[in-house]
Amino acid sequence: MSDLWYSSDPLGVSKPKVKPKVMLVDDEPTNIRVLSEALKADHDLIVATSATEAMRILDQGERPHLMLVDIMMPEMDGLEMCRRVKLMPELRHIPVIFITALTSSEDELRGFEVGGVDYIHKPIRVPSVRARVRTHLSLKGMLDRMLKLNETLKSKLHQLDQLNWRLRQQQRQLGRAEASRDLFERVFMVTSEGIAVLDGEGNVTAVNSSFSRITGYSESDVVGRYYEVLDGLSGHQDRQSIFEHLDRNDHWCGEIYNRRKSGEVYPELRTISVIRDADGKALNYVTVFNDITNLKETEQRLEELTWRDPITGLANRALFLDQLGTVLKFCHRGNVATAVLVIDIDNFRFINETHGFDCGDLVIRTFAERLKRICYEDDSIARLSGDEFAIVLSPKRWDIDEAYRVALQLFERIQRDLDEPIAYGTGNTLKIAATAGIALYPTESSDSPSLALRHAETAHRSAKGTNRHLAFFEDSMSEEIRRHLAIQSELDQAITQDNILLYGQSQFGPEGALAGIEILARWDHPERGILGPGEFIPFAERSRKIVVLERHIISKALKCLVEMQDSHSRLLCSINLSARHLAEDDFADEVINLVAQSGYPPELVTFELTESVMVSDVDRVIEKMDAVRRFGCSFSMDDFGTGYSSLAQLRRLPISEIKIDRSFLLSCLEDDMSADIVEMIRRIGESMRLRVVAEGVETRAHVDFLHSKHPGVYMQGYFFDRPRPLSGFFERSDDMRPT
């Protein structure tokens, strides 16, 4: 094997000269993928999906420089594979790093007993994997060099024995032996790693200058003393187990914490090798080590950035899904149950808007601390996003009923704890509440962490939607997930194949003349027929697909209207837009380009928004709307009266129209409060010089009410016409009812 895999820069960081071979042995495709992505750039990878396959590859002559081996595999586990590898002289020096979710000291001891050099604990952390692989390959290169040096040393020692016997007859050979010894001593002293040589009894016989530089101990401090002087913090049991391991394997490698002469504790990566005589007796022990303080600090920082929420220090979504996967596998194999909770803080947006983001962050941190205090120590807790948290109970010997009871008790404890107000500012307190969704496992999909989390999130949405504080996932809720996933996967195809149909509904002025048309979308689904917007728009709004869909609708609608422009050249058209679309950075430029490319007059285009656009950055929203308005288009506030807007915010928005939500008009004839709301909205429109459109005009009585009470209001509803295909909209204009 080449000893030139790695060189060292001035900072002591190993860099590859040529790509070393790394064998990945794991039956989990996800782990293979993560490890491959982490290592493929700098390593030649050999992949085996079982220990049996790996041994077959090795038997065929493949010689990797390092192996990453999962412990829990069918047929032959990683421990047995490592034991067999270490029994083969040509393979025994290949470092084996175990990959495992097991964390007990007994489990680790079994791994070291069969010859493993290190552990990578799940969840797999890419920076840690790269660092550990780099370190152990560097150590392997060092070990190979040391083995060569050891062989040289053995040879020279043998030569010295011969020289002593033949001294008088072969005096001339003495000079050569002295030269060889000088060479070895020069190599020994100039290497950057700390080296200590012990005799067969464990007494220190030599140390190099790097040993003194790292530890602070001079040669005179340690030479002639027993090996315990090298292990400032290792216990007797640790030293004994290491030497027992060396008796069986001639090589040990691991991380330990040591103490410098100054008393400072530091981490080191240590390798110990045994030099034996022809009879197998230990002549010398050679220990090589590096100070890995900087590596540990970097690893910790990268782990925190990659896997932790910066505000609470809890696991983030990625780490939680990894932890959840480990728990569900344990449940599946052990036939035990657990529960997944998704929980959020009620009205958290109101807290941010009313008390400020500093108070919001304080609430988040306090809530996280209370969750950690209430949950069991081995439960996994994560902050998923915003005010949303997740918990997976560490599985005990529970059946599904016990898991239900424990999860319910946990949420009750959380609720009781939230009775204690949160102090903020000077003398101010805030009381919060929480809503949770819970999914119990195992199920048929118990090995899918993403599905488990979605089930808990679905239950959480159900609780929110029914104004409950808690809901458990039920199989009936799966239909929503299936619909969501189907729409997510099929909507792009529907747009590409032009299966999105456009309908129009008329708007009439106060005098009964046709004033405009609202564009409405339908989905011509190949299996489910024509789907109304309520069956796919809400699902699309949960992802960026709503943006793609609305851009398609704008482009298609305006192209169709251009073709019909001759007969109705001054017809206003209204197109619905989502708050998510408006939040896009390129919203204004994209919309302006779509209108300009269509050739339809921008002054005839109105974009309908809902009051939800005002729950985020209002200033940024206004900036985008102003850009579109300057181009010539206008904006309408749809479903007015049902959202979060205030008059102060409404006055700031560059709108030209407000639409009364149909629920108020439908009940205004029987409900005085609804009639008052209609009156109030009309007056708001009058005072702000906005056009007011009443939706939900379904009967002659509605028309008469508006004519008598609100004569300036525009009208839209089933009394005049139902939504019809846009392509033939004006061919049926005679069917539209006059006012």
Image (spheres, rainbow, N blue to C red):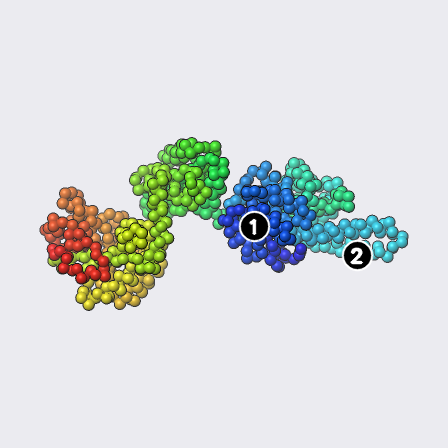
Give the residue at the far right of this rendering: 168
Q: Position of residue 275 (x, y in %)?
A: 73, 46
Task: Say left or right for 28 vs 554.
Answer: right
Say what amino acid the circle numbered 1 marks: Ala
In the rendered image, is residue 433 in sight? no
Q: CA distance from mark 1 to mark 2?
A: 47 Å
Q: To which quarter of the image does residue 606 belong?
A: bottom left
In the image, residue 728 above or below residue 142: below
Give the left or right position of residue 11, taking residue 721 as reference.
right
**Residue 466, position as x, y percentages in the image:** 30, 40
- From the image, tell me which residue sits under label 1: 48
According to the picture, the residue beneath numbered tag 2 turns out to be 179
Closer-to-camera residue (727/363): 727
Spot occupied by residue 712 in the image (x, y as percentages of width and height): 13, 55
Q: Is residue 554 visible?
A: yes
Q: Quadrant of the N terminus?
A: bottom right
